[in-house]
Image (cartoon, helix red, strand yellow):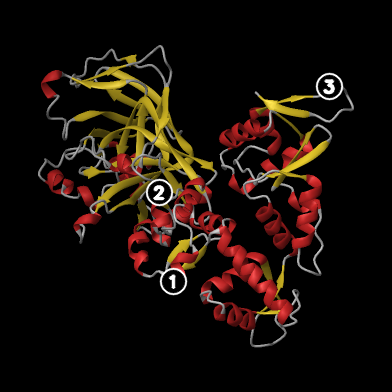
Amino acid sequence: MEQLIHKREMEKPSSGCRGAEAVLNLQSNCSISIAYHPHFGSHNDIMLLEIDEKLLPDILHQRVAIRGQPDEDSVLCTQSKTYALKFVGTSNSVFLIPPSNYSKFSDNTVDCDQKDENQQAVASVIKVAPGSMELTEVAPRLDKLKLLLFENPYRFEEDTEMEDLEATNRRLYKWDDLVDRVQASDDELRSGLQALSAVEIDGFWRVVDEKYMDMMLRMLLHSSVLNDWSLDALNEDEVVNVLQSDGFPCKLAEHCLHVYGSKVNNDGGKSCMWRLNERKVCVHFAREILRDRKMKMESFMEEWMRKIPEGMQASFDMLEGEVLTEKLGVSAWVHAFSVSSLPSSPGERFSILFKERPKWDSKDLQPYIRDLKVPGLSLEGLLLKFTRRTQPTKDAEPVFSAR
Amino acid sequence: MEIRVKCSCGDMCPEWAIVELQGVVEVQPQFQDRLQNLQIGHLCRPSSQEVYTFTVGYHELTGTKVPLKKPLLVLKKVKHPSVDAADSARAELEVIGIIRHKILFKTRPMALISNIPINLIMVITLIVSEPQPTVKGRAGAPDSILSTK
């Protein structure tokens, strides 16, 4: 009996306005009228975004944002990843039908009540969508972060000249300023700051001038000789105290340990223990020696060895990605060429690499490209895309040149 | 600038629907300016299968209900009255719905030969030569996404 009534009602569709649910749950042998919504219009403020099912929780729990400046193409950032936004248009007519109870257009029910009762079910189209946005995972655009921070590195003068700080304040960036300007997710931005050895000073993220870092490191090494400290077990409080008495702010003294050392497990003591990283210290001195000049290999090695603190062992392998060797006549010359100074977009990176050197063998090239990250493209893929690979004979090492 | 994507529906996003057809539905010129409440056509499900017909004017389309490979979110720009004047661009995108299915009509329309009175307001103009061309382009800056063109 009940079924029969149900059936009768379906044959003669019930009255009133209905929305998306009536379309999606349309029963067999039923029909529904599709009409323009009382508020039909272009509604440019309503857009469609195609999204991977696995990103849905991030969206529903409000962990995503769109970032970019007016002159940049927008990206969508989750906590850990960056996606390019692309608009994909369609020439089909895409009728968008909201659910009936969608509150923003709710006066629609009033409209329906006014109509006669024999009117059949209606689903209303609020707009015709011209297309939708799609997401493609991309590498974070961190070169801009480098650019912003190097506008104004932390220098000696700031320790003393307080009045100048006001003037330079305009070009300093807090975390929120960086989020506003750099197209990267929070996680990527944080690791970008770490890769640049940036430090938060008075709320502003800064890189510290190399000469300043050099001065602090030398002071630290000098003090460890004077105080008979082991470079494998430096007491944070003692180091910071000594550096502070030499005029370095506490925050920067701590930063010095972060940049050149790593924390050692604390055996229940009150103060943190640090071990200086041999490679980082040795690379620092090589960079200092080769700043703005080319040197003969022998004289470089001689000077480098002299500068390395006692107890540390320098080896030339440490300098891959930092120093390039070239043969000029019978002698080898070295000069600084640091991977950290190169852009992170593959196109620009390869262009600069081939400007530096028209031909690269694989062993030399590796350190300068292995940090490149392009979602969906392997290092092999990058080489195929941006280089020409030649191999004079079967057994010979391949050589890469510009395409 | 940063535009947060807000969602107040939690895990229960209201589902919207799409009815999609090839080509353009055109309205007789005299109705051009008052589309509101105007009927476009009739959506029918003749059997228990997920097959649908859509009757627009004297044309009938046959299509199916298809699940989307990836869901579409319906986003709406929300502008907040800014507290301080320098911060005028404070905007958010609010998730107002999700689309998981569409009723897709990709066939050419069949002319209805009928003696019943039909609605002659709507005409489907089909783009026959190009079966679903898409235009890919960059989405532009965040403020252009949000601008009301």
Q: CA distance from mark 2 to mark 1?
A: 37 Å
- For the C terminus of chain A, give its image quadrant: top right
Q: Could you say which disc has been placed on residue A392 in the image? A: 3
Asked if the residue at tag 1 contacts the one at tag 2, i.e. Cβ–Cβ closer than 8 Å, the answer is: no
Residue A179 visible in the shown view: yes
Read off the chain for label 2.
A
Name the N-terminal-most of marks 3 and 1: 1
Name the N-terminal-most of marks 3 and 2: 2
Disc 2 is placed on an element classified as strand
Position of residue A242 relative to residue A403, above or below, is below
Position of residue A317 relative to residue A135, above or below, is below
Q: Amino acid at mark 2?
A: Arg
Quarter assignment of residue A170: bottom left
Q: CA distance from mark 3 to mark 1?
A: 60 Å
- Near-viewer residue (B138 or A207): A207
Which residue is denoted by mark 1 in the rendering? A160
Q: Please determine if labels 3 and 2 lie on a single subunit.
A: yes
Identify the residue at image location x=31%, y=39%. B144
Q: Residues within 10 Å of mark 3 (few under 14, many from 20)?
A: few
Which residue is denoted by mark 2 in the rendering? A67
Q: Residues within 10 Å of mark 2 (few under 14, many from 20)?
A: many
